[in-house]
Image: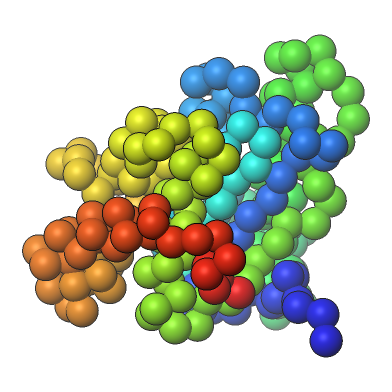
Amino acid sequence: MAFNYWQQLEEGEVYHLYNRSVNKEKLFIDDKDYAFFLQKTQKYLLPYCDFYAYCLMPNHFHFLIEVLRMEESTKAVISRENTKASEKLLANEISVNSFLEDQCRRLFSSYALYFNRRYKRTGALFQSRFKRVSVNNDVKQLSLICYIHHNPIHHRITNDYQNWRYSSYHTFFSKKSSNINRNKVLEWFGSGNSVLGKELFIRHHQDFKQLPTESWTLD
């Protein structure tokens, strides 16, 4: 039976969400591109998702997110989207999954419009369907965070997590405010102890570098 890479996005569930460019073209060429994509991600997805990890690569990206529950405060934000999808969600005519699919569509469309204008390019930029896979246990969540941060090493862009600026790895060593839910991630690694979690975060990432690719179990 084929694996389902397009699972329903449901409230309170954690997902690995990812997509890539068409024909392995570049998605990001310079710092401005990476920053613009993160800015649009903050606009379209952050109000409705907790972010636990991300990595932007030259031709693809990875997010680890948790879909927030639709509380009254969240519904107030949804009402300000002023889209057909937001109106239908508030009227209980569509699912949270359909609404978030539309938010992702808006994210990809706005970035593609920016990218095509900037580089005098035409046509689709992203593959038509972004993948989203439920991550339903703690062990997989920890492995997936390491996997996401490991991408630039796996693709031989660098051999050190710290050397890739376009991932959330650095966030866990910064005192600046962040859109990443650092405390929850460190509590995952430390079994509820965020101080211990920081030590184990580093250790797990170093151990992950030594694992053969065929041993990765992420789906």
Position of 13 with respect to 206 (left or right) is right
Question: What residue do we see at 82% from left, 80% from top?
Answer: 2
- Residue 175: image location, x then y, percent: 15, 41
Q: Residue furthest bottom?
A: 1
Position of 47 with respect to 44 (left or right) is left
Pick the front one: 173 or 203: 203
- Residue 42: image location, x then y, percent: 49, 44
Pick the front one: 145 or 216: 216
Residue 46 seen by the camera: no
Image coloring type: rainbow
User: Would you identify the image quadrant in which residue 199 lies?
Assistant: bottom left
Question: What residue do we see at 63% from left, 55% from top?
Answer: 18
- Residue 91: image location, x then y, percent: 70, 75
Pick the front one: 212 or 34: 212
Question: What residue do we see at 11% from left, 67% from top?
Answer: 196
Position of 138 with respect to 74 (left or right) is left
Residue 172 seen by the camera: yes
- Residue 117: image location, x then y, percent: 76, 17
Q: Give above or below for 93 relative to 182.
A: below
Question: What residue do we see at 36% from left, 31% from top?
Answer: 163
| On-image quarter of the C terminus | bottom right
Q: Give above or below for 187 relative to 76.
A: below
Q: Residue furthest left?
A: 195
Q: Give above or below for 122 relative to 11.
A: above
